[in-house]
Amino acid sequence: MSTGLGTAFDEVGIKSAIASRWPKYSSYELKRVVSGGTENAMYRLGNELVVRVPLHDHAANALKREVAILQCVRLRALNVPKIVEFDAGSKSSMPIAIYEWMQGSDYFTNPPLDPVQSAELLASFIAELRSNEPDHGFLGENSDHKRGIPLIEKTEITRKSVFEIADEFDREVLLGIWDDATKAAPHDGMPSWFHGDLHAGNLITNGGILTGVIDFGLAAVGDPAADLPPAWWLFEGEARAKFKKSLGVGEDEWRRGRGWALHNAVIAYAYYRDKEKAELTKMSRDAIVRLTEETD
């Protein structure tokens, strides 16, 4: 699929594409937003808007999915992206979405002052998301990343990544964490909504407080344990305990959540550690360290 924005994937091409689709924005200033993400190019449009343009086909599918999901779930516990305009594109052009600009910065760059409060706020968001009526059209098993499916189905790819980072981490320890997670009792209730990608790059802070959640491209319906990885990606000690207690998580779900945290972290770390993605590398490595420390 072509971007449909010309060979120069830059501000000139983006501005032209926006003007052709929504002429009313043709006079707005456009400025690239520096981001550590790998899926979308982000541009400020005037003072109040932000444009997201996917960088490849999978990201295009995720953007379409995000827009559809945000239109069918109701969330108030934390700020979420508010869609202003959306064009689904065509066979020869990428989709483009325009959102209201969310004030603040990402959790990685400016972590909140109180991790325990953040754990409680994030748990409230997850609980509220879970309370939405599940839409079986968004089952995780039908999505590109297949989050929220039975963990055992992720064994091959998880083990592969564990072996790839065995020069830094004890693979037997990591495989032991995975084995315990896959032996936990499976989710036996109704499938529920989950965000699926609650790492520091997708959380917004403002004034030292967790205020928002972005990037719903991996959101789906399935095992709610898929939203427990922040317990290890973000939190330690009292904050982790508060997160677990606030969600009322049982031991089997917690063990599966640990498995999802390990799965996400080892894949990300194996892929990004030799690339120029310092934030993603550090986030995933820190998660692995926390998981292994918990087994000591």
Image: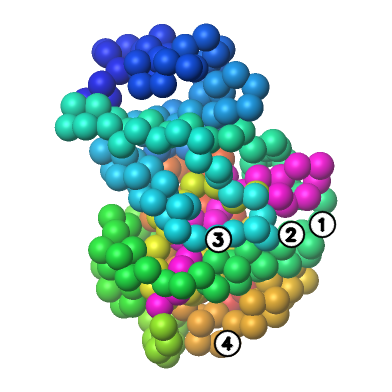
Q: Nearer the viewer, residue 75 or 238?
A: 75
Q: Nearer the viewer, residue 277 or 217?
A: 217
The answer to whether the residues at label 3 and label 4 have Cβ atoms under 8 Å apart is no
Magenta residues? Answer: 191-211
Q: Quadrant of residue 161?
A: bottom left
The answer to whether the residues at label 1 and label 4 have Cβ atoms under 8 Å apart is no
The answer to whether the residues at label 4 and label 2 have Cβ atoms under 8 Å apart is no
Q: Name the residue: 65% across, 58% down.
A: 76
The answer to whether the residues at label 2 and label 1 have Cβ atoms under 8 Å apart is yes
Q: Secondary structure at mark 2?
A: helix
Pick whichever of labels 3 and 4 is earlier in the sequence.
3
User: Left or right of 59: which side holds 283?
Assistant: right
The residue at which mark 2 appears reads as: 118
Q: Secondary structure at mark 3?
A: loop
Q: For marks 4 and 2, give the CA distance.
A: 21 Å
**What is the three-letter code of the residue carrying label 1?**
Asp
Q: Nearer the viewer, residue 72 or 129?
A: 72
Q: Residue 117, position in %: x, y? A: 79, 62
The residue at which mark 4 appears reads as: 250
**What is the three-letter code of the residue carrying label 3?**
Arg
Q: Is residue 38 above or below residue 209?
A: above
Q: Name the residue: 21% across, 32% down.
A: 90
Asked if the stretch drawn in magenta spans residue 268, the answer is no
The residue at which mark 1 appears reads as: 114
The residue at which mark 3 appears reads as: 74
**What is the three-letter code of the residue carrying label 4?**
Gly
